[in-house]
Amino acid sequence: MAHKRSLNRVTLVGNVQPRDPEISHIPNLGKDVAKFTLVTAEVYMDKNNQWQESSEWHNVVAWGYVAKKIEKSVKRGSMLLVEGKIKSRKWQDKNGQDRKTVEIIADSVVILDKTEKQQNYSADSSYGNQSNSMNGNNDDNIQAPPEAQIDDDIQYDDPF
C-alpha cells in the first residue's frame, strides 16, 4: 500500500431541502443518526449575459451528538455550514439491484440562519460540553472550536 498523504474534507454551505431531517435511533449501536439533503447553488452569467443558477443536492449523514442537535434545531429551509468527509457505499434495493450512494458524513454543523440563538454543533465532544453565553441563554448553545466560530458582526444572508 502506498504511503501517500491525502485529505478527504468537505465544506458546504446550503439549505436543507426538500423536507425536514430524518432522525433515527440505531439500537445495536446505541447512537442517533440524522439524514438530510443539503442544496448548494451557484449563480453565474452565461455567454449570452443571462444569469443562470446551477444546484447540487448533497446527501448528508450526521451521527451521535450532532444528530441530536440537528433534531432539535434544523428544519426544512435552514441554512447550514456542514463540514465532513465524502463517503461512498454500495447497497441493494428492494429488487436486488446494486446501487451506489455518495454521502457527506458530517462531523460539524453550524446553523447560519439569523435566529434568536445561533448554535454550532461539532462531533468533537470536548467542545460539545462547553457553554456559550450568546444572548444570556446557556441551555443549548454550544461553542464550536475557535476555527469554526462565526463572527456575530457578519450578516449571513442567503445571496440568492
Image (cartoon, grey):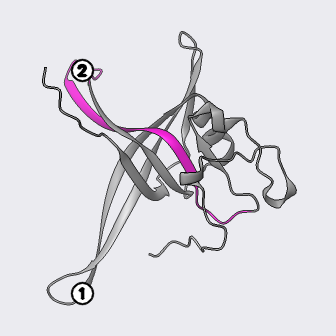
Q: Amino acid at mark 1?
A: Gln
In the rendered image, residue 28, in percent from the top left (x then y), is placed at 54, 9
Classify the position of the N terminus by image quarter: top left
Check residue 96 for magenta coloring: yes
Residue occupying the far bottom of the picture: 49
Q: Which span of residues is magenta-colored?
A: 90-115
Q: Position of residue 69 (x, y in %)?
A: 65, 39
Count the labels in the image. 2
- In the rendered image, the residue lying farthest to the top is 28
Q: Secondary structure at mark 1?
A: loop
Q: Residue at x 47, y 76 (%)?
A: 159
Q: Give the residue number, with chain letter if any, for mark 1.
A: 50
- Please tell me which residue lies in front, 143 or 83: 143
What is the quadrant of residue 52 in the picture? bottom left
Q: Position of residue 83 (x, y in %)?
A: 45, 46
Could you say which is closer to the camera, residue 25 or residue 157? 157
Taking the spot 76% from the left edge, 62% from the top edge, the residue there is 116
User: Where, quadrant-wise, is the C terminus in this rendering?
Assistant: bottom left
Q: Which amino acid lies under the numbered mark 2 shown in the image of this protein?
A: Asn
The structure residue drawn at horizontal position 24% and vertical position 20%, both measured from the top left corner, is: 95
User: Dot 1, how many residues are within 10 Å of its Cα: few (below 14), some (14-19), or many (20+)?
Assistant: few
**Label 2 sits on residue:** 95
Q: For residue 84, what is the image quadrant? A: top left
Query: In the rendered image of this protein, does residue 149 appear above or below residue 85?
Result: below
Question: Could you say where residue 114 lies in the image, as x and y percent from the top left?
Answer: 66, 66
**Is 111 on the left-hand or right-hand side of 160?**
right
Q: Is residue 91 magenta?
A: yes
